[in-house]
Amino acid sequence: DTEVTQTPKHLVMGMTNKKSLKCEQHMGHRAMYWYKQKAKKPPELMFVYSYEKLSINESVPSRFSPECPNSSLLNLHLHALQPEDSALYLCASSHRDGGSYGYTFGSGTRLTVV
Amino acid sequence: QKEVEQNSGPLSVPEGAIASLNCTYSDRVSQSFFWYRQYSGKSPELIMSIYSNGDKEDGRFTAQLNKASQYVSLLIRDSQPSDSATYLCAVKDSGAGSYQLTFGKGTKLSVIP
């Protein structure tokens, strides 16, 4: 299995809703990432988990809450989002230091906040 | 602050020609370099990685790295319309605990049939 699976693929939520994005990989990667990508912009790092511990939080607002229940799963809990949070949310994974393989990205969740 | 610079394009080439995509980076400690292809509305897909000075070839793709000039490029030979996409250059530091990829803004490539 060489894939990173993200669900759902599309999500529309209101500003008072609570929702979660899910990410799963079975490649034995021990680093997992959340990125946010707006249209015509490069991916922007949000969070890094290494060995299930949060190692980087790029000053992301608290309305985004990551969780890594085990080495294969990564969640992003969303609450009280704003319309400007609408974007493509990408999960990625890598060997611990990115090594020779770079990151493998999931297909993303297209989020629309209304 | 690390910076990765790419010409945003669009870069238009005729079908069958060589497309040349360029990237410069500011941080001399950068050790690993990646090219991702991203189709509109899709996620980035890793197509090439390079770590040593010189050329690395994979099918129609050749990555070139010059660490002294802090320059990395991607050549696409025999360009096809299906190569039309945005190409993201990404760089990473070496060392344990160094996970973060720094992306350039991407170059949009259009291959004209």
Image (tube, coloured by chain):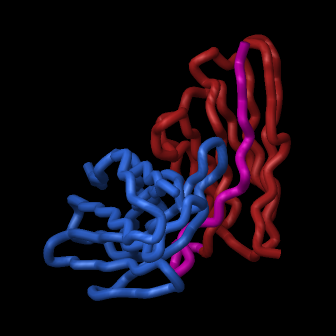
Chain colours: A red, B blue
User: Can see residue B95?
Assistant: yes
Q: Where is residue A75 in the image (x, y as percent from the top left)?
A: 77, 45
The residue closer to the viewer here, B75 or B44, is B75
Q: Is residue A112 magenta?
A: yes
Say which residue appears at 58% left-offset and 46% top-offset. Answer: A35
Say which residue appears at 74% left-offset and 40% top-offset. Answer: A109
Asked which quadrant contains residue A87, the reply is: top right
User: Can see residue B97?
Assistant: no
Residue A72 against residue A101 in the figure, above or below:
above
Say which residue appears at 58% left-offset and 40% top-offset. Answer: A36
* SS assignment for the magenta stretch, majority: loop
The residue closer to the viewer here, B18 or A85, is B18
Taking A103 as reference, is B14 left or right?
A: left
Q: Where is residue A67 in the image (x, y as percent from the top left)?
A: 74, 46
Taking A75 as reference, is B40 left or right?
A: left
Q: Where is residue B19 in the image (x, y as percent from the top left)?
A: 38, 66
Q: What stretch is highlighted in magenta?
A: A96-114
